[in-house]
Amino acid sequence: MSSRTPEECIELALDESATESEREDAIHELEMANECDELDALVRRESLSDGLRQRALQALATPQCDTMLRRLAGEESLEPSLRQEAESILHERDDQ
């Protein structure tokens, strides 16, 4: 595990000069640290690639981030595909 701060992870996730793997690792670090607000900000970041936004959304699928995930599922301003993904994650979690 890295010793990056949440702010450094956000910067790396947004850094277009970083590799896709490095950016995904930064999102994973935010997930492991339960940084729900930061993950939410990445999901909402329209300038971020769809794949990384999806990865950030999937990282919210933890009990600690449940409220944030539910908020995203009902967020009208969020792209329909991301809203649907949030709803799908919630349904999967509720079925378990």
Image (tube, rainbow, N blue to C red):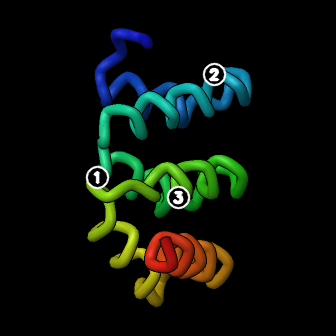
Label 3 to label 2: alpha-carbon separation: 17 Å
In the picture shown, does residue 1 fall above or below 38? above
Q: Amino acid at mark 2?
A: Glu
In the picture shown, does residue 29 fall above or below 59? above
User: Which numbered disc flags the more N-terminal residue, 3 or 2?
Assistant: 2
Mark linked to residue 73? none
Residues tagged 3 and 2 counted as in contact (Cβ below 8 A):
no
Mark linked to residue 22? 2
Q: Amino acid at mark 3?
A: Leu
Q: Amino acid at mark 1?
A: Asp
Label 3 to label 1: alpha-carbon separation: 11 Å
User: Which numbered disc flags the more N-terminal residue, 1 or 2?
Assistant: 2
Q: Residues within 10 Å of mark 1 (few under 14, many from 20)?
A: few
Residue at the disc numbered 3? 57
Is residue 61 rendered to the left or right of residue 23? left
Q: Residue at x 62, y 33 (%)?
A: 24
Q: Residue at x 28, y 52 (%)?
A: 37
Residue at the disc numbered 1? 37
In the picture shown, does residue 50 fall above or below 34? below
Disc 3 on helix, strand or loop?
A: helix
Q: Residues within 10 Å of mark 2 (few under 14, many from 20)?
A: some
Residue 65: image quadrant is bottom left
Which image quarter is the N terminus in?
Answer: top left
Residues tagged 1 and 2 counted as in contact (Cβ below 8 A):
no
Q: Quick one: 23 or 36, which is closer to the camera?
A: 36
Q: Position of residue 54 (x, y in %)?
A: 63, 57
